[in-house]
Image (spheres, rainbow, N blue to C red):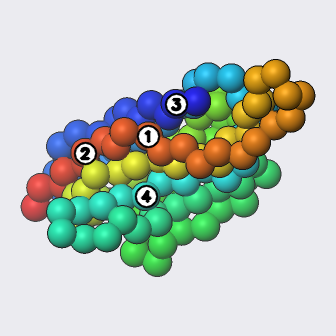
Amino acid sequence: VQLQASGGGLVQAGGSLRLSCAASGTIVSIDDMAWYRQAPGNQRELVASITKDHSTRYADSVKGRFTISRDNARKTVYLQMNSLKPEDTSHYYCNAIVREPVLGTGYDRYLEVWGQGTLVTVSS
């Protein structure tokens, strides 16, 4: 199972970007999906998360500016980022809890998967 993130780039303060992250591989289902970010010298922090029933949670620093959504049929999670600030500059990573089959056993297992990261740079 892999997660492929895209949509990062350079934007001026006040601008918008939309990140996407698509899951691929042999997947039974996907539970929670999330976006994290990590700036140089900082710890990775949760930006937003969404359950498969579309319940959402946000870091205080992005509430009212960012929106997380998902398309279960496309196995994709999105992060719409509006009113971007220079302090939003970071590498953004998608994360998912994936249920996959264990081949030859008839059982499934849960796996935490990370995407490769996409860089968002907000200029002042």
Q: Which mark is residue 2?
A: 3
The residues tagged by marks 4 and 3 sit, at their Cα atoms, a distance apart of 16 Å
Number of marks drawn: 4
**Residue that numbered label 4 is attached to:** 36
Q: Earlier in the sequence, mark 2 or mark 3?
A: 3
Mark 3 nearby-residue class (10 Å; few <14, some 14–19, many ≥20):
some
The residues tagged by marks 2 and 3 sit, at their Cα atoms, a distance apart of 18 Å
Residue at the location (35% across, 51% down)? 92
Q: Is residue 49 above or below residue 4?
A: below
Q: Earlier in the sequence, mark 1 or mark 4?
A: 4
The residues tagged by marks 1 and 3 sit, at their Cα atoms, a distance apart of 7 Å
Tell whether label 1 touches label 2 (CB within 8 Å). no
Front disc: 4 or 3? 3
Q: Nearer the viewer, residue 8 or 115?
A: 115
Amino acid type at mark 1:
Gly
| Image coords of residue 64 (percent x, y) | 48, 68
Q: Which mark is residue 115?
A: 1
Q: Earlier in the sequence, mark 1 or mark 3?
A: 3
